[in-house]
Each structure stands twice: as structure tokens, then as C-alpha cells.
Image (spheres, rainbow, N blue to C red):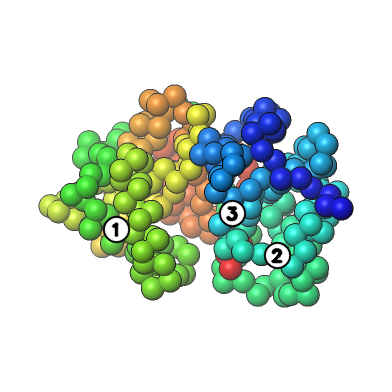
């Protein structure tokens, strides 16, 4: 008998209570619940442990995301996963992700280091008020006419940050994803001439939090403060929508951390990412 249970719409209130305990940390799962992951035919699944009155959750889709996991829940999730794995990344609180990955490696007989990319400590930062820095007045939402330049910038960011070229590994899917960000008004940009020189996306968004992802500045313009004005504008737009602005950044990326701190972001936790 399985230790965990696939949750559905009847569990929505319980899932909401677990997620709402830390809406910044749990922004991704909240966004997936809002997108219908608990409904029949939803994309992905949410597992709960124990089967009755679950307190720990595991989102399984393209991303594997643990929520509120302790040692007992981790053992149950690992046992129920068995040899199954079709997710391409594991992301979440650092202790949860690294503990789960260690346990899975022991179960699967794999090397802990045998992954494409591992980010063991990423600073989770948040801001619930307008930016401390002035916004760049040129910042705006990207529109359809920006797509080609925005897509090139997004692919460059992805290649640089995740050590993978999406134009080779997933050209159609990534193109569709970037277009959807623009259509959903979740893509911010600064354009000079017809060229995108700054970009940032709202990669996950719940009713309470918006998580900024994909921040990129044209390489030749880095070090000139462009990212501060751009991020200040993105932050102000999120806060004006009634949400807390959040993001996570590699702890070794000192220039990016400095930018976010200049905009008033404070560290509120630590995440980890394992990419396969």
C-alpha cells in the first residue's frame, strides 16, 4: 500500500493552509494550485503524506517540489517514488531538496553529484514595499513586437544560468513558453532601439506573491546600474498589484545579490535546485 495519496480538489483547503504558512517559500506550489493541478486532467500531481490529514506535500510535474517535509515524510515519498522519475528539476527549501535527493540517490544507487547542475544554496529574497531604488522610466511590459529580441535574450539568459541551450534541447517548447509570458503580461523589458537590453519574467505567481525569474542584462551594458533600475520597476509593479515580490539567486552571484539589496530585498530563506 502506498504511503502517500494523490490530492485533488477535495483537498484544496488543506493544501491552501499548508502553502499559506509560508507564501513566499511556497509560491510555486500556490501558482500550480491556482492553475488547476488538483483538478481532473491538471498538469502534474500533488502528493500528500500521510494519506489521512496530510501535512507534507510533493509536487510532481516538470519540477519536483517538496513542501513542509520532515524525515518521516521524506522516507514515505522516496518509497512511493520507487524507480519513477520523469521530472527534470528538483527545487525547494535547501534542506528539503538536498535531503530528498540524498535519499533518492541511496534508493536508486546513483551518485549524488551525477546531475547536470546543482545549486545547493540559493538566497530566497523578498520585498513587500516599493523599491528603495528609483525605477528606470523605460521599463515596460513586453509586447508582441518585442518577441524576437525578447526570445533571444531569454535564450541567452537560460544558457548562461542553467548551462543548457534551449534552442537545441527544447526549441519549440521554450519558444511557446516565452511567447506565453508576453501574452500573459508577465514579461518586463527595457528596449533600446529595437533591442531588448534588460528583461525579467514573473515565472510563478500566486494571489499573494510574484516570483521574479529570468533577470538578464545585455552583457556589454552590465555594471552600469541598468539592472537596478529595471528591477526597481518590476518590484514596484508587483507591489502595486497587491503582491509581495520574491526571487531566488545563487549565493555566489555577488553582483545580482547587490542589485536586489539595493532595491530593498531582504533574505528570507535558502532554496536549492538540482537539474537533471
The location of residue 125, given as percent across then percent down, is 53, 41
**Mark 1, secondary structure of its residue:** helix
Query: Could you tell me how far apart the alpha carbons at marks 1 and 2 are, in whole angstroms?
Result: 33 Å
Mark 1 and mark 2 lie on one chain; the one further toward the N terminus is 2
Any mark on residue 61, and which?
Answer: 3
**Mark 2, secondary structure of its residue:** loop
Query: Could you tell me how far apart the alpha carbons at marks 2 and 3 are, in whole angstroms?
Result: 12 Å
Q: At 61% from the left edge and 64% from the top edge, which residue is drawn?
A: 86
Q: At 79% from the left edge and 47% from the top edge, which residue is drawn?
A: 4
Q: Is residue 175 above or below residue 238?
A: below
Q: At 80% from the left edge and 69% from the top edge, which residue is drawn?
A: 106
Mark 3 and mark 1 lie on one chain; the one further toward the N terminus is 3
Q: Which residue is mark 1?
A: 151
Q: Which residue is mark 2?
A: 84
- Give the total of numbered labels: 3
Specify few, some or many for label 2: CA neighbours under 10 Å numbering under 14, 14-19, or 20 or more: few
Specify few, some or many for label 1: CA neighbours under 10 Å numbering under 14, 14-19, or 20 or more: some
Q: Quadrant of residue 5?
A: top right
In the rendered structure, are the residues bearing label 3 and label 1 in contact, judged by CB atoms less than 8 Å apart? Answer: no
Q: Quadrant of residue 39?
A: top right
For the residue pair 95 and 14, the one nearer the viewer reads as: 14
In the rendered structure, are the residues bearing label 1 and label 2 in contact, judged by CB atoms less than 8 Å apart? Answer: no
Q: Is residue 75 above or below residue 49?
A: below
The location of residue 98, given as percent across then percent down, is 71, 58
For the residue pair 211 and 125, the one nearer the viewer reads as: 211
For the residue pair 242 and 218, the one nearer the viewer reads as: 242
Amino acid at each position: 500500500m502506498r504511503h502517500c495519496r494523490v490530492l485533488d480538489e477535495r483537498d484544496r483547503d488543506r493544501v491552501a493552509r499548508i502553502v499559506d504558512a509560508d507564501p513566499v517559500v511556497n509560491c510555486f506550489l500556490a501558482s500550480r494550485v491556482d492553475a488547476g493541478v488538483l483538478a481532473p486532467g491538471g498538469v502534474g500531481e500533488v502528493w500528500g503524506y500521510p494519506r489521512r490529514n496530510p501535512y507534507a506535500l510533493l509536487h510532481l510535474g516538470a519540477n519536483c517540489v517538496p513542501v513542509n517535509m520532515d524525515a518521516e515524510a521524506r522516507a514515505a515519498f522516496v518509497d512511493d517514488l520507487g524507480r519513477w522519475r520523469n521530472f527534470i528539476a528538483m527545487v525547494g527549501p535547501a534542506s528539503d531538496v538536498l535531503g530528498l535527493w540524498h535519499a533518492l540517490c541511496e534508493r536508486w544507487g546513483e551518485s549524488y553529484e551525477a546531475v547536470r547542475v546543482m545549486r545547493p544554496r540559493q538566497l530566497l529574497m523578498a520585498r513587500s514595499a516599493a523599491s528603495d531604488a528609483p525605477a528606470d522610466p523605460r521599463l515596460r511590459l513586453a509586447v508582441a513586437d518585442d518577441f524576437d529580441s525578447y526570445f533571444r535574450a531569454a535564450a541567452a539568459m537560460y544558457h548562461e544560468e542553467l548551462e543548457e541551450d534551449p534552442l537545441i534541447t527544447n526549441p519549440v517548447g521554450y519558444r511557446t513558453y516565452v511567447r506565453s509570458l508576453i501574452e500573459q503580461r508577465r514579461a518586463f523589458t527595457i528596449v533600446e532601439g529595437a533591442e531588448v537590453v534588460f528583461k525579467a519574467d514573473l515565472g510563478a505567481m500566486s494571489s499573494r506573491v510574484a516570483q521574479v525569474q529570468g533577470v538578464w542584462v545585455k552583457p556589454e551594458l552590465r555594471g552600469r546600474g541598468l539592472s537596478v533600475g529595471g528591477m526597481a520597476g518590476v518590484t514596484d509593479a508587483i507591489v502595486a498589484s497587491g503582491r509581495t515580490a520574491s526571487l531566488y539567486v545563487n549565493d555566489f552571484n555577488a553582483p545580482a545579490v547587490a542589485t536586489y539589496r539595493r532595491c530593498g530585498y531582504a533574505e528570507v530563506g535558502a532554496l536549492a535546485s538540482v537539474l537533471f
